[in-house]
Amino acid sequence: MTSRQLHLNAFLMSAGHHEAAWRLPESDPTGSTAVEHFVALAQLAERGTFDSLFLADSPVSRGVARRPSSVLEPTVLLTALAAATSRIGLIATASTSYNEPYNLARRFASLDHVSHGRAGWNIVTTAGPEAARNFNLDDQADHASRYRRAAEFVDVAVALWDSWADDAVLADQQAGIWADPERVRPIGHRGEFFSVEGALNVSRPPQGHPLLVQAGSSEDGKAFAARYAEAVFTAQQTVEDARAFYVDLKTRTAALGRDPETIKILPGIVPIVGSTEAEAAERSRLFDEHVDPEYGRAQLARTLRVPLDHLPLDAQLPADLPAEDEIEGAKSRYTLIVELARSERLTVRELILRLGGGRGHRTFHGTPEQVADTIEDWFSTGAADGFNIMPPALPGDLVSFVDQVIPILRDRGLFRREYTGATLRDHYGLQRPAGRSGEVAAIA
Amino acid sequence: MTSRQLHLNAFLMSAGHHEAAWRLPESDPTGSTAVEHFVALAQLAERGTFDSLFLADSPVSRGVARRPSSVLEPTVLLTALAAATSRIGLIATASTSYNEPYNLARRFASLDHVSHGRAGWNIVTTAGPEAARNFNLDDQADHASRYRRAAEFVDVAVALWDSWADDAVLADQQAGIWADPERVRPIGHRGEFFSVEGALNVSRPPQGHPLLVQAGSSEDGKAFAARYAEAVFTAQQTVEDARAFYVDLKTRTAALGRDPETIKILPGIVPIVGSTEAEAAERSRLFDEHVDPEYGRAQLARTLRVPLDHLPLDAQLPADLPAEDEIEGAKSRYTLIVELARSERLTVRELILRLGGGRGHRTFHGTPEQVADTIEDWFSTGAADGFNIMPPALPGDLVSFVDQVIPILRDRGLFRREYTGATLRDHYGLQRPAGRSGEVAAIA
């Protein structure tokens, strides 16, 4: 099989991505802290030969009443999932605003060693003042400053991973030389945000660098992705928007001298699968029936930065919303939601239902064939290199996807029947960056 | 069996605690980053019904040439070991000087959930300027300041673990209420070192709080242990010193209103076991033969804060060494080494061999009966509640201990034949601290 291949990531989230998932009779509402729940999901995704699985993260407790809000720290949970699987890639979100690069570089290097080359890092800057208040600050840094810190953070992490040459460990028992000190070098970094002497205390990860993933789609976010990201998660409501984003990001990447093939773009989708159209529509209604409109209204008010009483459920959005450049949080998601509501003239109630599935990611229902058609259409018309699959309820909708949609994608020659590589980089067709003593690193 | 029971911790370290262990023909010199090496050790320790296993840590790379110096981050490695075991406790070292309490409290809470109540945290302040230089500092904070930060750090972590009441999660699918917001409270901490709003984003750990462990034996360290620690690792060269330390720490603990039974004191020992005395002596010689005196001299010079050329190998230590209160690093270990050398009039070369096994921990060889005799003597004469077992080579000397020494301890009624509890606290006979909505927490 030499045709271009889809890349699929399984985005795992407690009872599922739909905000009402935990309320369905089929769901275990306490799965969010049960490692067994996630082990079963990881093994299911591996049976589906997904490239990777992924865990989101934010170091803050918010809105505990209405959703499963106790969550395991992703690098810990992913390590447990590494032990329960053997091939699937493992991507954890971690914040550059609320970690130190030495600590985080160690954890990802360690996860890459423990998983034999399956670790990825979704780099986030963490929007919102609530997280800042858990880390000795009264408010978050501004958007541009967060991204400058993120860039310096990644530069330091990469330098730390490369601080050991690939051939540094000699383990020469006779001579009593464990590592060649000439091949383990301090990094001596002094920058705007960090001073880090190095070297790291973990040898170079099996993948050279864990896979670098990014998910912000603001101007700052796209500039960052073009420079650093090897896989990008993005929310796109229409195939036209997705194509425009795809061309934009590939062009930006090429403009920096990187091969655009080295950045994989994966829009998030929330597919509600039914054996028939009627079954799919019925399942979609089941989710809608469990949505709590007051919870949705509060979430929306927070995203839009407007008071709750400005959002009557049966009216359209207020006309006087701020412009994107006034938003300090998730800028691109803000614009997506406002444009979705305005272009389709949705009431707040309708908008809440549309956002309930995937918080702005494209949510749709259909038969396995219809879902596969959408995937193939986006993939073959320049909108995506693959997809970030966000099952609305877990495990149910991941079972449907693996058992009903993936066989169709395989039959169409779009997706692997079995893993051919060993590492996360292998699955995504990305090279291992050369180390210090070798050729120039792939990530310049 | 109602007699007082020993507690045993298996201190795992790459090829073993003896600095020459990795050079023995029996050793895998690359085991330090191989998860399979540690999984085998963890399963072996669990077969020996050890209370717990333990991993040390320092966020710095130092002296890569002469020992296995690439090490996996302990919370990551312990999570992998949690997945490979079911009963043994899992204790990771983590620094209060180079972490943020919100992040670390989450990681330990997550490890406690993933392991179903088997997590412990060895609280260290991390001595030395080298680590500081990986975290935006030119030098470490002074000793007293590091301990003040450690105390505030633990206060914040405990408050975060307790920020969720035990009964906070309702998971009421019908009513759509996941957690009771009245039972998940911000902590609103504002102190000298940290401002943390909370609540944590992980529900209360299965153990209430992961077990709190401490290992410093300076004045500051003992004061800290008396207040916070539930298990204490300590280096003691003689049974008399160990008894004095034991009485001192139990007395300090009682003076703070804590039941002295709630702090378990575990001296470290490096037992070299042979089936006969001759075999044990032969194995001890094998280790000595592989010691690199120049490496030992450099290590010793660093610990003693004297230039290398002041340490001729065949002379005794210089007379003009600094007093303990001038040492900013590991104060109590410094004093132990100086006193050991002076009391036995050791040359630098002899001292290096004595320290090679356990860096100041009591190293001795003998038959299984003799090792068991020492353990029983210390245990039954007020010197220890148990031991931190530091096998000189791994897995070999842990195999000997499990297969030859533990059966004797069991036959004498000193040690469990099988686990009777489920959690790490159960193994150590320590209560689960009550949560916010219950009685007063055991750790005041």
Image (cartoon, coloured by chain):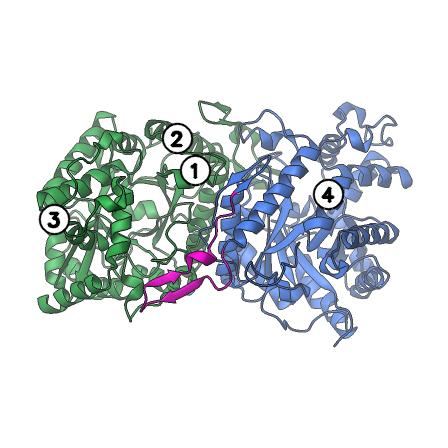
Chain colours: A green, B blue
* Foreground label between 4 and 2: 2
Magenta segment: B164-188
Q: Is residue A202 above or below residue B328?
A: below
Give left or right: position of A96 versus A442: right
Viewer can see residue B30: no
Q: Chain of mark 1?
A: A
- Which residue of the protein is positioned furthest toward the front in this rendering? A309
* Label 3 with label 1: CB-CB less than 8 Å: no
Along the line of sight, the residue nearer the viewer: B88 or B251:
B251
Q: Which mark identifies residue A132?
A: 1
Along the line of sight, the residue nearer the viewer: B261 or B124:
B261
Q: Position of residue A21 (x, y in %)?
A: 28, 62
Label 2, secondary structure: give it: loop
What amino acid is found at the position of numbered circle 1 in the picture?
A: Ala
Q: Of callouts 3 and 1, which one flags the residue occurring earlier in the amino acid sequence?
A: 1
Residues under labels 1 and 4: Cα distance?
Answer: 31 Å
Residue at mark 4 shares a chain with residue at mark 2 = no
What amino acid is found at the position of numbered circle 3 in the picture?
A: Leu
Label 4, secondary structure: give it: helix
User: Which residue carries the number 3 mark?
Assistant: A346
What amino acid is found at the position of numbered circle 4 in the picture?
A: Gly
Q: Position of residue B34 (x, y in %)?
A: 52, 51
Q: Residues within 10 Å of mark 2 (few under 14, many from 20)?
A: some
Q: Position of residue B129 (x, y in %)?
A: 63, 29
Residue at mark 3 shares a chain with residue at mark 4 = no
User: Which residue carries the number 4 mark?
Assistant: B221
Q: Of callouts 2 and 1, which one flags the residue occurring earlier in the amino acid sequence?
A: 1
